[in-house]
Image (tube, rainbow, N blue to C red):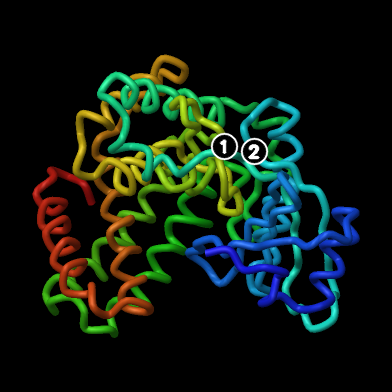
Amino acid sequence: MTVPALTDLAPALRDWLRQTLGTSTPLTTERLPSRSNNRSYRIRKCDQSFVLKLIHPQRERAIAHELAILPYLRDHHFPVPAVLAIGRGLTDVPETAVLRSHLAGLPASERFTALSTAARADMLAAMGTLLARVHALPLAEVRPFWQFPEDTVREPMDWATNFVQKKIASDLGVLIPSGALPEDIAAQIGDLLPRWARTLAETPVMLAPLHGDFYLDNVLVADNGAIAGLLDWEAARLGDPLWELARTQTASFGDAPTEYAHFLAAYSQHIPLAIDEGRMVQYRFLMAMGDLRYAVRHAPDVIPERAARLTRLWRQLMETPGWS
């Protein structure tokens, strides 16, 4: 829905936009979907489009992290938006305003089913190649600005101690007292999962720059099926590339193993990474645990479904020889 004259934005923000865009002509806005407490709008000036992102104060550090990464990515020819202006301290605007270029295209999740089989295979291959390009960026160059603010990773063991162990402790702190899981399952998870996380610190993990949220909704696809953009870099971090592959598989291809195989084959042509299937299973379980945590805090209607899935995955994990 298009709303004329930015009626739901503060006057100071409207003035900042007009001044930044160098226009006194009317602007129109369209509210874009958001999965966080940020707000995003498509801004139209005549026949030009831009994206305005209003960053909630709680997300300021993560967005500052993303803004440090984007110029490097553009210099290296990644399909990411240009940052055109940043507005802070605007009257009656608690957020930070970030104006970006608009990347044409629809999320791959919306294009996916409409593509022919051949075009879909090409898109999956392009996605695999794009993620491989991210993971292949030289650590020596990106390390100073690719660190996630709360989870610094300098050495391989830091991945386990500063990310995985912290995530498990945080998720268990929500799930165990919630009563969402059967008591016996909750007790087993609370006992065994932290022990596995500690042993991960002794596992040789190859560090790579991760996108942090690589799945179909964050990949823009043009009308011709080419990838037009890769969005939402605020969760970028240094870490285990298997984590990102497991997350992408779970979020985008959970019910489509053939399509994930197309994606992984293209990725593997550029990064011949040895896939530790045991670690992938464990990581996929952690994804499901995060999904249930979200439901407990924000979406109680889906708690039974996600709890049943987590219980099923846990029982499968318990049958994996020597996983813990």
Earlier sequence position, callout 1 versus callout 2 = 2
Q: Is residue 302 above or below residue 324?
A: below
Q: Amino acid at mark 1?
A: Gly
Residue that badge 1 annotates: 229
Residue 280 lies in quadrant:
top left
Residue occupying the point 38% across, 64% down: 168
Where's residue 167, x and y in %?
43, 63
Mark 2 belongs to which amino acid?
Val
C-alpha distance separating marks 1 and 2: 6 Å
Give whichever of 45, 92 is nearer the camera: 45
Q: How many marks?
A: 2
Q: Residue at 46% across / 17% down in the picture? A: 270
Is any atom of residue 279 visible in this view? Answer: no
Q: Find the residue positioned furthest to the top.
A: 269
For the residues bearing labels 1 and 2, Cβ distance under 8 angstroms: yes
Q: Is residue 303 above or below residue 260?
A: below
Is disc 2 placed on a helix, strand or loop? Answer: loop
On screen, residue 188 above or below 223: below
Q: Residue at x 21, y 66 (%)?
A: 306
Left or right: 117, with 4 as reference point:
left
Image x and y of residue 226, in percent: 48, 26
Q: Secondary structure at mark 1?
A: strand
The label number, if any, that marks residue 80 in the structure image: 2
Instruction: Please state the horizontal and vertical placement of residue 169, each as a whole percent of the image.
Output: 40, 69
In this view, 72 is above or below 121 = below
Estimate the x, y position of residue 211 in percent, counting from the top left. 54, 42
194 to the left or right of 128: left
